[in-house]
Amino acid sequence: MADNVMERRNKCFGETVAANLRKHGFDAYYCNNRQEALKKALELIPKKDIVSWGGSVTIQEIGLLEAVRNSYRVIDRDKAATMEEKLEMMRQALLCDTFLMSSNGISEDGQLVNIDGIGNRCAALVYGPRQVLIFAGINKITKTVEEASARARNTAAPINVQRFSDLNVPCHKTGVCSNCQIEDSVCCQIVTTRRCRPARRIKVILIGENLGY
């Protein structure tokens, strides 16, 4: 019974936020679970598209990375042999057809907040790829855009740095944001997307599960 109650609440909540995102010019969808999200993703990506992505645990968790690697032409920076090749692939990804990512925070009123180190993910979100697909678990939604920004700094960033053992940043050791100005900082760009222009270029798929960080 409890699971059904939570599922119903998440659906109502997710569809409300999706409607608010549409008011801001985004395409937005609510999916009950990761299986539905994967199906929706593959419906939204034309077979002829060249696909790339930014760092995202969510798109791995829903099985999308494996699916696009098997079915599409991709720009896959993980295949790079050197850092120079990896950086060049990240540049090429800015002109792909479909770019995949998550969001560090989404406000209930329909705004996105993303935080980035190098900036490739935020750059693709803002301009370049023909379409951007964003996948976000219900845990990424906050009451206000200010809370979404705080979530990006204080929750997402300190967790995400644990994925990279070579980063020399304070939150890697403490788990707490210290507002550092270190070269390796993963908080160099903080981008709020308050409206999608051109309309519907960015498509947000909200998922009724806790996914990613």
Image: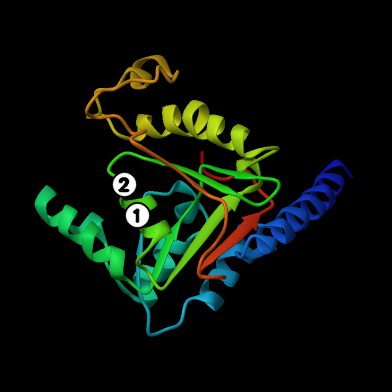
Callout 1 amino acid: Ala
Around disc 2, counting alpha carbons within 10 Å, would you say few (fewer than 14), some (14 to 19), or many (20 or more)? some
Around disc 1, counting alpha carbons within 10 Å, would you say few (fewer than 14), some (14 to 19), or many (20 or more)? some
- Residue 172 vs 143, above or below: the answer is above
Q: Residue 79, percent across and down?
A: 20, 59
**Which of the pair 137/203 is nearer the observer?**
203
Which residue is denoted by mark 2 in the rendering?
A: 119
Describe residue 69's horizontal placement relative to residue 24 as left or right. Answer: left
Describe residue 196's horizontal placement relative to residue 85 as left or right. Answer: right
Q: Are marks 1 and 2 in contact (CB under 8 Å)?
A: yes
Task: Identify the residue at horizontal 34%, vertical 66% (top origin).
Answer: 128
**Which of the pair 210/200 is nearer the observer?**
200
- Look at the numbered disc 2 and give the secondary structure of its residue: loop
Callout 2 amino acid: Gly
Q: Residue 147, percent across and down?
A: 62, 32
Say which mark, if any, is on residue 123: 1
- Look at the numbered disc 1 and give the secondary structure of its residue: helix
- Residue 173 vs 51, above or below: the answer is above
**Which of the pair 79/50 is nearer the observer?**
50
Q: Residue 114, percent across and down?
A: 47, 44
